[in-house]
Image (spheres, rainbow, N blue to C red):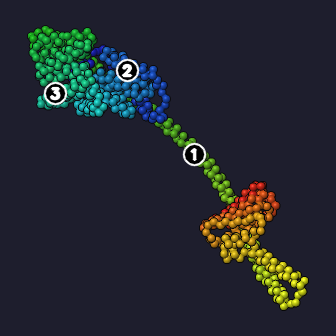
């Protein structure tokens, strides 16, 4: 791990790009955080419409690809491409491309060994992926955070993040991801001695654990047909065997790795593998081959401009020269090592000074931002207060208008209720008046019927008895006998007519036997010898109702039948009565000449139907009549019994 920390800090020209990146980061951390938070806080339903189109997506992907291509070649160019990609993704509002751009920025700073800056960008990317719920991307970032802590030599944190990534990759059976994390876990355990103080026994356990992880990684690389990954694992296994002082086991692994790197023409892989091969030959005591491997690695580093960490190559090369007795070359290699190391040390010091200056400027800007935020808060508070007052006034006006409208509605409703009450009282008064008239009429009819039956009827009967007695005792001539008999016959007819009139005024059968018997007697009495034929049909039980109800129904049917006989010129009159416990209804129909029932009662001559309607309504009943000229008449009466 120490080698990894020092590797890329050796080149002085990287300092210029470092200054540029530090300046750019120091200028916009707060604004970047605010912009990201603003976009993340917007719900999908209310998120503003961005201009994200396919061309933007292609451009962002292209910028990120260029940033990756320049990562190990020109850090300044890599930074520019990364920043352009991040700016365009913020403008488009695409959370996915924002996350990819932030991750690429983290990789950039990780390559410059600026671990805190790298961690900041990785965490921002992780927050976006947690909101998006993309567990695959979360696993990638967990693995990269594990690498950051690996380079910062924080073992527990690195192990925790790598394990999180491994759990997700295993859940989705991502062989490539599993292989990569297992490789990182191997490197973590092989370098644990730099993170913690370890005993020799603990180191041996760590190294064996690292080899186990590398071997597991190789199995998954084989499943994914990742030959590059296998070569990298083989080189790492060789490095661990060298630490275990087992170079004979390391040699086979490193030669396999070198063969693959040469085959795929990977210069960086070749020179890295040659460095491990040189160390392996040195431990085997084959100093010539060790120097040969180191020199080839040096040549490729210079040829391909991959000189990061080359000072450690010179340090390792000095050792086989020394053991071979070639002190001149050993001294030369060591001088190169010291020179490059000191320049890197000075560059590191310069970087630290620049960082301190950047932090100081950032604190000044932060204070200014806080002051502006406080001023903005005061303005917002005033604006909110004014808005609240305006809203309160609007609410009060609205409430007053609504209350006034409600009061008007209530007043109108109260007025309507009063009018309805007056109408009800007037209707009730009319009902009472009608019922009073009918009761008076029935009382008068009863009195007249009684007077006729008991008074005049008795008198006529007495006259008949006396005349009959005279007929038996007196001597009457034959001519006078005929006249006398005719007088007695007229007297019988008068008595019968008197009884009929008295019965019509107040039928005794109604009081004694009920509605059904009274109607049967009525229909029998009024039916003429010829036309019309009068039929009565009674349905239901022979129930006794109140005297008032039975009398009203009797009078109504009586009036309807009499009207039909007088005016309809019908040949058939049919009366139907329906007797139920809670309802009494009747229908009187004829096949006479009919009339126009759509004409109001008041427009027709006579008040017969109007009186019938009043009688029925007085008992809270319903009266309907239907008739058309030439189509007969049908009258329906229905009274609900409470």
User: What residue appears at the point 77 percent right and 66 percent down from the top-left corner?
Assistant: 530
Could you tell me which secondary element the residue under label 1 belongs to?
helix
Q: Is disc 3 surrounded by few (<14), some (14 to 19) or many (20+) residues within 10 Å? A: many
- The disc, 1 or 3, on the residue closer to the chain's N-terminal end is 3
Name the residue that disc number 3 marks.
Answer: 207
Task: Name the foreground residue: 207 vs 492.
Answer: 492
Tell me the distance, in whole angstroms, between the alpha carbons under discs 3 and 2: 37 Å
Left or right placement of residue 316 versus residue 557 in this view: left
Q: Which type of secondary structure does the marked residue at label 2 adopt?
A: helix
Q: Residues within 10 Å of mark 1 (few under 14, many from 20)?
A: few
- Look at mark 1 in the image and give the residue it sits on: 395
| Residue 459 on image: x %, y % | 81, 84
Tell me the distance, in whole angstroms, between the alpha carbons under discs 2 and 1. Answer: 54 Å
Q: Classify 5 as above or below 547.
A: above
Q: Position of residue 161 (x, y in %)?
A: 27, 32
User: Quick one: quadrant of the N terminus?
Assistant: top left
Pointer 2: what residue?
64
Question: Local crowd at mark 2 within 10 Å, few (<14), some, or many (≥20)?
Answer: many
Looking at marks 3 and 2 on the same chain, the residue that comes earlier in the sequence is marked by 2
In this picture, residue 172 sits left or right of residue 419: left
Residue 590, picture quadrant = bottom right
| x then y, percent, for residue 6 | 24, 20
């Amino acid at each position: 791990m120490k080698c990894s920390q020092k590797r890329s800090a050796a080149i002085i020209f990287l300092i210029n790009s470092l200054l540029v990146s530090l300046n750019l980061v120091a200028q916009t951390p707060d604004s970047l955080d605010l912009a990201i938070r603003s976009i993340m806080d917007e719900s999908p339903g209310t998120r503003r419409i961005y201009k994200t189109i396919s061309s933007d997506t292609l451009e962002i992907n292209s910028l990120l690809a260029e940033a990756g291509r320049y990562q190990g070649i020109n850090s300044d160019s890599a930074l520019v491409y990364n920043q352009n990609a991040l700016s365009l993704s913020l403008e488009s509002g695409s959370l996915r491309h924002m996350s990819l751009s932030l991750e690429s920025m983290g990789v950039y700073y990780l390559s410059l060994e600026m671990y805190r800056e790298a961690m900041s960008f990785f965490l921002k990317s992780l927050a976006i992926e947690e909101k998006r719920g993309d567990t695959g991307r979360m696993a990638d970032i967990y693995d990269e955070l594990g690498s950051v802590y690996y380079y910062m030599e924080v073992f527990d944190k690195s192990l925790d993040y790598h394990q999180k990534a491994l759990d997700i990759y295993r859940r989705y059976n991502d062989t490539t991801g599993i292989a990569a994390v297992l490789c990182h876990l191997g490197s973590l355990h092989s370098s644990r001695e730099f993170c913690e103080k370890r005993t020799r026994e603990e180191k041996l356990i760590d190294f064996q654990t690292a080899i186990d992880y590398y071997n597991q990684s190789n199995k998954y690389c084989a499943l994914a047909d990742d030959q590059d990954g296998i070569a990298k694992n083989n080189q790492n296994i060789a490095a661990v065997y060298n630490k275990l002082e087992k170079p004979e086991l390391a040699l086979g692994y490193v030669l396999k790795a070198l063969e693959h790197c040469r085959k795929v023409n990977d210069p960086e892989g070749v020179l890295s593998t040659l460095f491990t091969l040189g160390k392996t030959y040195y431990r085997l005591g084959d100093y010539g081959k060790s120097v040969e491997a180191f020199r080839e690695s040096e040549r490729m580093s210079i040829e391909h401009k991959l000189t990061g960490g080359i000072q450690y190559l010179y340090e390792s090369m000095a050792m086989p020269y020394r053991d071979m007795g070639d002190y001149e070359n050993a001294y030369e290699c060591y001088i190169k090592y010291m020179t490059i190391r000191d320049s890197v040390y000075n560059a590191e010091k310069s970087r630290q000074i620049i960082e301190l200056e950047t932090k100081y400027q950032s604190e000044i800007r932060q204070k200014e931002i806080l002051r502006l935020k406080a001023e903005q808060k005061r303005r917002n508070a005033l604006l909110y207060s004014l808005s609240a007052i305006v809203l309160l006034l609007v609410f009060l006006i609205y409430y007053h208008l609504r209350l006034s409208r409600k009061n008007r509605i209530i007043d109108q409703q109260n007025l309507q209720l009063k009018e309805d009450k007056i109408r009800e009282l007037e209707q009730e008064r009319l009902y009472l008046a009608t019922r009073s008239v009918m009761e008076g009429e029935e009382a008068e009819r009863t009195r007249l019927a009684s007077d006729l039956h008991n008074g005049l009827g008795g008198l006529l009967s007495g006259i008949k008895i006396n005349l009959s007695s005279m007929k038996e005792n007196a001597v009457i001539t034959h001519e006078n006998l005929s006249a006398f008999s005719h007088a007695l016959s007229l007297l019988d007819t008068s008595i019968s007519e008197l009884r009929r009139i008295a019965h019509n005024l107040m039928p005794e059968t109604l009081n004694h036997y009920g509605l059904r018997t009274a109607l049967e007697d009525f229909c029998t009495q009024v039916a003429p010898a010829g036309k019309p034929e009068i039929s009565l049909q009674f349905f239901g039980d022979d129930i006794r109702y109140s005297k008032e109800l039975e009398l009203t129904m009797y009078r109504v049917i009586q009036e309807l039948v009499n009207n039909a006989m007088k005016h309809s010129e019908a040949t058939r009159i049919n009366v139907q009565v329906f007797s139920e416990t809670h309802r009494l209804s009747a229908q009187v129909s004829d096949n006479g000449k009919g009339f126009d029932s759509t004409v109001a009662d008041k427009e027709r001559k006579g008040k017969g139907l109007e009186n019938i309607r009043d009688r029925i309504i007085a008992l809270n009943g319903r009266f309907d009549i239907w008739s058309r000229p030439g189509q007969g008449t049908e009258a329906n009466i229905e009274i609900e019994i409470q």
